[in-house]
Every structure is written in C-alpha cells, then in structure tokens.
Image (cartoon, rainbow, N blue to C red):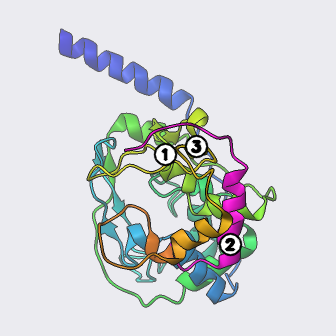
Amino acid sequence: MRRRRARAVALAAVSLISAGCALHVRPPLEFRAAGPVERGRYLYENLMDCDGCHQRAGAPMPPEKDIPGRLVAPNLTPDFETGLGRWTDGEKIRAIREGISRNGRPLFPAMPYRNYRRLTDADAAALVAYMNTFEPRRNALPRSRVNFVVRSYVRSWPRPAEAAPMEPGEYLATLASCVDCHSPLRRGRPIPSRLFAGGRIFDGGARSPNITPDPESGIGRWSEQDFVNRFRLWRPGGKPSPMPWSGLSRLDEADLRAIYRYLRAQKPVRTRVH
C-alpha cells in the first residue's frame, strides 16, 4: 500500500511538473555559418570553455551528487555517425542558444544554454564556423540518462534566444557563466539573493569565492589591475580547480577589465567562504 501511494504521489507530481513545463521549440535558422574563425576560437576555447566538458569528441561527465543520473557531453566534431556531421549550422546554433537537440529533444542544462541564449547572431555564427573546422573523430557515447521527474522539469529550461543588447562586461560574464559557478544553487539555478556571492560546492570540496564588491568577503578592495593580475599570473600546475583558468587567463585585457567593472556594479553580499 505504501509503495502504491508513493507511486501515485510521484505520478501526480510528474503530471503537475509536465503541465507547467511546456517545451519551447522553434525551427532552426537556415543559414551557413561564415563568421570569423578566430573570434569563434576565442569564444570556444577562452570565454565559454566548451572543451572543459566536451573534450572536443565528447566524454562522460563526472557524477554530481545533485544530479540523479548520468550525463554525457556529446561529440562536437563533424563525424557523421557519432558527432555533428548530419547537423545543419542552424541546428547547432539552436542547440547552443536554445537548448534543443536536432531531434527536438531538450538538452540537459549542464550546458548553460540559458546563458548562451544571449549570444549574438554574429558570435553564434563565428562559434559554429570554428566548430566546423574540427577534424571528424569517431567516438560512440551513451546517451545522458536522468530520472523521469528531472527529465520533465528540464522541459521548462529551453527558451528562444534573446537579442536584447547587453553591456560588454555583462555579456562576457554571461557567456563565461560566472554567476553559475560563483553563486549557490537551488534546483539547478542561482539563488537570486546570493548572485556572485560564492559558496557553490564542487566535487572534491572546492567552494567558489565571493566576487561581489563586498569589501570584507568579496572583491571590494580589489583594484581593476588586481583583477587583471589574478588572471594573468595564473600558471599551469598546482592544485586542481573547477575554474577554467587555462582559457580565462588568455582573455583579452580589455575583456577582463569590462568583466571587473560589471562585477563591481553588482550588489555587495557579505559571505564567508572557507
């Protein structure tokens, strides 16, 4: 009886979740990406750290205690059997910005397409143009698997791309997904009152630091040059970190300064991260 009741409650929950989780699917754009490849490389390798998960030809992602299932980052090379060889450029851009796979399936938001939906048309074209230069690599991978409750909830995440203009620092910080790593999460989303305040716990126990302009626990005492130096002085080796230093340390100085100014304009939040 108890099992039946639990199953009934679970099914009712799924029905409620599904009812409020309409999937937003638009046809993919019809065009051939022809943006500047070097700009696409900069976005892919330095700002967005795509290979941090995909490793170019795809890979299973490390398990996370908050995700009930197995996530696999797909193969991004143009292999026809195991990669993106059959995808149009429009389908690739829709997946990146709107979270919809080629077959209309919602993508799991471990890829932060909720941030990438702000990607401009020009940058989206440049990013895909760079991806189109990859050598095909055959790498058969299993599909991601999550439980049915989470799968239903994920249907609410895809949204149409947003073309609204943003200030340079906000745009760069959004594509770098700074808020996702430097904020505590609730149900996979940053807690609105704690944005950029740090405290997200990663596998291995690492905690992200506070990057709000709070003078005691954040970057309120940092000068713009201090911020730039923190990235420029990074060197390979040492203790592993969830921060993708390798790519971010090679950002243009003007971009680092723009990100700093954006962060300094945020609400200061006092927190202690140990």
Which residue is the extreme one toward the top?
Answer: 1
Q: Is 60 situated left or right of 117 in this image?
A: left
Q: Amino acid at mark 1?
A: Gly
Task: Based on the picture, tell me whether residue 89 belongs to the magenta stretch.
Answer: no
Q: Specify the quadrant that holds the N terminus.
A: top left
SS state under label 1? loop
Q: Amino acid under label 3?
A: Leu
Kindly identify the amino acid type of the residue bearing the numbered disc 2.
Answer: Asp
Q: CA distance from mark 3 to mark 1?
A: 31 Å
Q: Which mark is on residue 23?
A: 3
Magenta-colored span: 248-274
Q: Position of residue 210 (x, y in %)?
A: 52, 47
Residue 206 circle label: none
Residue under numbered circle 2: 255
Q: Earlier in the sequence, mark 3 or mark 1?
A: 3
Q: Are marks 2 and 1 in contact (CB under 8 Å)?
A: no
**C-alpha distance separating marks 2 and 3:** 35 Å
The residue under label 1 is: 198
- The residue mark sitting in front, 2 or 3, is 2
